[in-house]
Image (tube, rainbow, N blue to C red):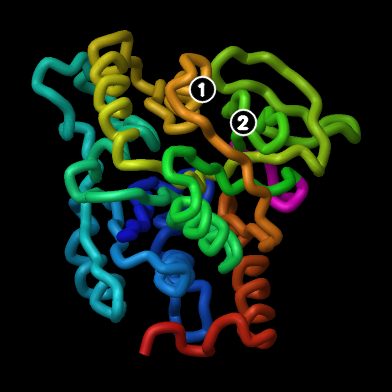
């Protein structure tokens, strides 16, 4: 079965202080997405779609996607004006519309089952294998590849994660939250409701690694139409986990949780950069990756 990797790379990197999706982290100048494409290819994915800003098109064509071999690469563009003309978007809004909108911008390039990930998160080879096998072996179900919260925490500040509520690997809800340590406890605050609750380092969290079916794009399109014709402010977002949660609430899909044994490394803050580089170097020394990823 032909499968596609979709990489969200249009973020502005405000907390990082730059375009972290093109920050070199490997010994030969590799960016994190280079490792994701490499892992996806060896897990059986035949195509990758980068969702980027139009202003970065030339850079990606010149420095990023021309290096890959053995996998089809396409570009999709996430822009605020990629919405129906009747959309209710404030004229002075500059913030992107969220991860759900990113996928909306790539929908016409997706022709089968797919996984969608962040460009600035290092997920590890096992995660891609888990997702690929699941999509092959389970015809109708969806999957979220998750990690224990403690693996995804940053020592430099709070992070945004989807807190997973599951029962026997079947996900009941994903609560998009801002999480950090307060008085020795790990406190999560729902981005949607403001509810505050405690979690542990072992609590599974979603970090935007979802294995989805092409049919989901029909649901996405309908939900996006409701969003853009509703009350769009300067900051609210159309978020993929919230769409999935609504699907779960309405019993439209079955979403399974698979906890990855890989180490997840993200670059929320610039101080995280050395951690990412050191982790990748250790995997190269272990033999997981060649010193020069794409020759």
State left or right for residue 271 relative to residue 36.
Answer: right
Magenta stretch in the rendered image? 150-160
Which one is in front, 63 or 206? 206
In the figure, is residue 85 to the left or right of 178?
Answer: left
Residue in view at x 57 percent, y 58 percent: 130
Rendering coords of residue 17 (x, y %): 48, 52
- Location of residue 223 (image quadrant): top left
- Compared with residue 273, is residue 68 higher up or lower down, i.e. above or below? below
- 1 drawn magenta: no
Q: Quick one: SS at disc 1?
A: helix
State if disc 2 and disc 1 touch (CB < 8 Å): yes
Crowding near pointer 2: few (<14 within 10 Å), some, many (20+)? some
Q: Quadrant of the C terminus?
A: bottom left
Above-or-below relation of 211 to 249: below
* Residue 123 horizontal/vertical position (percent): 57, 60
Quadrant containing the N terminus is bottom left
Up/down of 278 relative to 81, above or below: below
The circle on residue 171 is: 2
Residue marked by disc 1: 248
Q: Residue furthest top?
A: 231
């Amino acid at each position: 079965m032909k499968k596609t990797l979709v990489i969200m790379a249009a973020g502005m990197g405000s907390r990082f202080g730059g375009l972290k999706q093109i920050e070199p982290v490997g010994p030969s100048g590799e960016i994190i997405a280079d490792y994701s494409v490499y892992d996806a290819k060896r897990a059986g994915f035949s195509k990758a779609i980068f969702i980027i800003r139009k202003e970065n098109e030339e850079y990606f064509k010149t420095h990023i996607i021309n290096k890959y071999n053995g996998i089809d690469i396409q570009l999709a563009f996430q822009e605020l004006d990629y919405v129906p003309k009747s959309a209710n978007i404030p004229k002075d809004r500059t913030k992107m519309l969220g991860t759900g909108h990113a996928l909306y911008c790539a929908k016409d390039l997706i022709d089968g089952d797919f996984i969608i990930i962040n460009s600035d998160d290092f997920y590890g080879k096992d995660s891609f294998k888990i997702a690929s096998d699941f999509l092959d072996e389970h015809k109708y179900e969806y999957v979220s590849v998750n990690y224990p919260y403690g693996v995804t925490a940053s020592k430099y500040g709070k992070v945004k994660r989807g807190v997973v509520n599951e029962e026997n690997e079947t996900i009941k809800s994903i609560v998009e939250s801002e999480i950090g340590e307060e008085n020795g406890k790990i406190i999560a605050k729902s981005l949607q409701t403001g509810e505050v609750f405690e979690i542990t380092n072992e609590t599974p969290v979603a970090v935007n690694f979802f294995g989805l079916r092409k049919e989901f794009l029909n649901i996405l399109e309908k939900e996006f139409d409701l969003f853009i014709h509703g009350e769009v402010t300067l900051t609210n977002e159309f978020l993929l986990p919230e769409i999935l949660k609504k699907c779960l609430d309405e019993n439209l899909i079955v979403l399974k949780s698979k906890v990855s044994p890989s180490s997840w490394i993200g670059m929320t803050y610039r101080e995280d950069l050395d951690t990412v580089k050191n982790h990748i170097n250790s995997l190269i020394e272990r033999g997981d990756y060649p010193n020069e990823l794409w020759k």
